[in-house]
Amino acid sequence: MKIKKYLTLMAFALVFGVFTQSCNEAQPKEITFENPLVFQRADPWVHKAEDGTYYLIATAPEYDRIEISSASTINGLKDAEAKVIWRKHNEGPMGNHIWAPELHRFDGKWHIYFAAGTAEERWKIRMHVLSNTSANPMEGEWVEEGQIMTERDDFALDATTFEHKGQRYLIWTERAKPYNTGLLIAKMKDAVTLEGPQVVITEPEYEWEKIGHQVNEGPAVLKRNGKIFVSYSASATDHNYCLGLLWIDEDADLLDAASWNKSSEPVFATHEGFKRFGPGHNSFTVAEDGKTDVMIYHAREYKEIQGEPLRDPNRHTRARVLHWTEDGFPDFRNDVND
């Protein structure tokens, strides 16, 4: 009897072990990131190429150059060596405040959209474009395509581009009195040229968008679940910096300002308990599994800043999984650490 009971228990343990192992294998592996991913890199943009390579481009704290680094994984960007692909001019346009570069691939070329002041007037900031026909953006020659001209021709930055139903669009940040900056959208004729109406889709209206500076900037586009979502950053670039969210139905007229919706509260903000201060100016990419959405953003690890926040270099690049609500909206999970 004892032998039979022992054998029965052994058989049960074996079956239970196999069952447990199969269940564990069926569970998706939790995706985690080695944050901070990159130190002293603000306004981070991560592009995942068709071959799975991740490219990181961001604002260098010296505001004098554009760098690209690459890795086969998002965490691999932590140790990736950055390559300088362009430096500011010594005089004239593109000579100062080299900010918020973004890397895009379309029309058989790589394109970098970035903001820059002139060497003589650092706050005369406008949007500019570089292009490269090489298959690898870290190789080949980067060509200066020129400035993106806007109707206002005023303080303009943070250009991001996307395609929708065969039409390419640009969303960007531009000064619009009586506030500092709002977001505009327009159709694109080509990689550098806007065409048609230039429409304001958001401006600072809530108190959380007006702390220090009245700002809406740093748009990032994510198309999911029948909608186009646009995250953006608001307020001054200290601990008050935070993310807001716009959205529009994919079948709506993107140039109809009334069709855009806006969250009345920030969707991602400072959390002192996590030492996450002033999170913002994000981008979106997809994890190595090809389906999990990931948000790349910058934040500081302390609240108090000596002097002008833009002169504090410690905005670090971070990554976190972006979740979704049952009704198809991005869930930034502000109360969850990364």
Image (tube, helix red, strand yellow):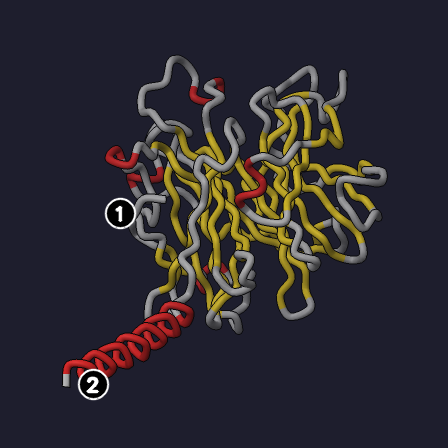
Q: Place residue 10 in its image quadrant.
A: bottom left
Is residue 178 visible to the viewer in this orientation of the structure? no
Which mark sits nearer the N-terminus, 2 or 1?
Answer: 2
Is residue 93 visible to the viewer in this orientation of the structure? yes
Q: Could you say whether the residue bearing mark 2 is in a helix, strand or loop?
A: helix
Q: Is residue 265 left or right of residue 134?
A: left
- The picture places residue 298, in percent across and down from the top left corner, at 46, 36
Query: Residue visible at 42% across and 61% down?
Result: 29
* Label of residue 260 in the image: none
Q: Nearer the viewer, mark 2 or mark 1?
A: 2
* Label of residue 4 in the image: 2
Q: Up-down: is 93 above or below 324?
A: above
Of the pair 118 and 195, the residue shown nearer to us:
118
- The picture places residue 203, in percent across and down from the top left corner, at 43, 45
Q: Up-down: is 70 above or below 169?
A: above
Q: Place residue 7 in its image quadrant.
A: bottom left
Query: Residue visible at 39% across and 34% down?
Result: 214
Q: Which residue type carries mark 1? A: Asp
Q: Is residue 145 left or right of residue 201?
A: right
Query: Residue visible at 34% across and 30% down?
Result: 239
Of the pair 294 and 252, the residue shown nearer to us:
294
Q: Which residue is mark 1?
A: 335
Q: Determine crowd level at label 1: few under 14, some 14-19, many 20+ residues with C-alpha closer than 10 A.
A: few
Q: Is residue 62 left or right of residue 295?
A: right
Q: How many marks?
A: 2
